[in-house]
Image (spheres, rainbow, N blue to C red):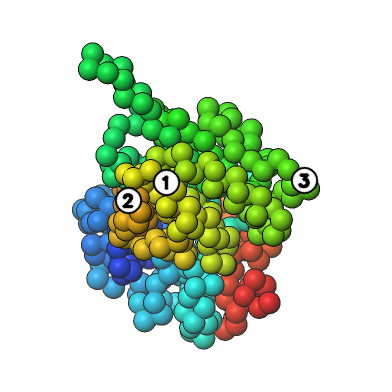
Amino acid sequence: MAGAIKIAVLRERATGESRVSASPETVKKFIALGATVAVESGAGITASISDDDYRAAGAEVADNAVQGADIVLGVQGPEPEQLAGAKPGAWIVAGLDPFGKRARVDAYAAAGYEALAMEFMPRITRAQSMDILSSQSNLAGYKAVLVAANLYGRAFPMMMTAAGTVSAAKCFVMGVGVAGLQAIATARRLGAQVSATDVRSATKEQIQSLGAKPIFVESVAGIEGEGAGGYATEMSEEYQKAQAELVSAHIAKQDIVITTALIPGRAAPRLISDAQIATMKPGSVIFDLAVAQGGNVEGSVPDQVVEKHGVKIVGYSNTPAHLPADASALFARNLYNFLSAFWDKEQGKPVLDEEIGNAIRLTQGGKVVNERLLG
């Protein structure tokens, strides 16, 4: 075991971050591959995982877990000073926010680390189990609906009682990626009448398959909104105008609106204006899942409930962190699935291929090497 590579699991330092990058389950699996695992003291406490849980799985628990580490795991990118003691060329495997934290990426390069940004994982079939954006967005879409339902002063399902009938809430989901699909499913489970829209026409069938009503611009042809890797791209002015008119008419009738639209590396697109909010019924609720990237909703503020025109607007800067146990379990599996898929038994360590390696590698050999950061 002397030559085994060492994997370090850090305690998260970012404000409001309650997740952890390894679980006792994945610790056991890494050890089974032949690695040793060191977990920083207290790393799992906010995700309901004790130091003893990690010890029972076979990990060393230490205040300085990073000392001598070959691979350092994190949920969010660690600051360079947290990495002191890691081996030269150590891999940093986490959600690194490469566009928002460019100076930190440069610092990783200067220190000689190989930084691997998990959010740059290509959206290809064999990488689905490694995709942190999908696993965390799934939980975020679920939580958004629960928070909106809690703030909404009425019931979600239709209820027929001796005292009269309660009408079902009307919920509109804007953006039908992973978070949006889970939001639709959750709102349907709670009994709401659900409708949804997206710039990608291919999502219409997905919306219908979940029992929701698709709301789409039909008059502007030839715009699919499908970008590289399955992400949405920005639309033409003509399409944006047509969509805004359609959405304005629809939004005025809604009780709950969930917005989920993000474009990687860009500010979140503005979907709802103050004027549109003013047309909504008093007591309505909007949850802005993109609030940390500038927001889809005019006037939304991270981690605050803002009331405008009698409408409550809410959004968390880190929605998955509000479900820390499950979010950590899924995130940890994403990291294990990634590293184990490339594990070379002879070398006793992971060896990346070009397709995924080049997509997620930010720094190597003292330089920033990722094409998306060099443009």
Are discs 3 and 1 less than 8 Å apart at CB? no
Question: Observer-nearest residue: 319 or 312?
Answer: 312
Q: Which residue is mark 3?
A: 221
Give the image quarter of residue 292: bottom left
Residue at the (59%, 38%) spot, across then down: 215
Return the disc, 1 or 2, that comes first in the chain's sequence: 1
Disc 2 to disc 3, C-alpha distance: 37 Å
User: Counting other residues with Cα less than 10 Å from the Cα at mark 2, is it few (<14), some (14-19), or many (20 or more)?
Assistant: some
Give the percent coordinates (x, y) of residue 60: 28, 61
Quadrant, the N terminus: bottom left
Closest to the camera, between mark 3 and mark 1, is 1
Q: Which residue is mark 1?
A: 280
Return the disc, 3 or 1, that comes first in the chain's sequence: 3
Three-letter amino acid code of the residue under disc 1: Met
Residue 375 seen in the current view: yes
Three-letter amino acid code of the residue under disc 3: Ala
Are discs 1 and 2 less than 8 Å apart at CB? yes
Q: Which mark is residue 310?
A: 2
Disc 1 to disc 2, C-alpha distance: 8 Å
Give the percent coordinates (x, y) of residue 74: 40, 64
Question: Observer-nearest residue: 336 or 171?
Answer: 171
Q: Which mark is residue 134?
A: none
Q: Is residue 242 above or below residue 273?
A: above
Say what secondary structure mark 1 lies in: loop
Give the percent coordinates (x, y) of residue 243: 63, 49
Return the disc, 2 or 3, that comes first in the chain's sequence: 3
Quadrant, the C terminus: bottom right
Three-letter amino acid code of the residue under disc 2: Gly
Residue at the (55%, 60%) spot, across then down: 269
User: 272 left or right of 148?
Assistant: right
Q: Is residue 126 above or below residue 264?
A: above
User: Counting other residues with Cα less than 10 Å from the Cα at mark 3, is it few (<14), some (14-19), or many (20 or more)?
Assistant: few
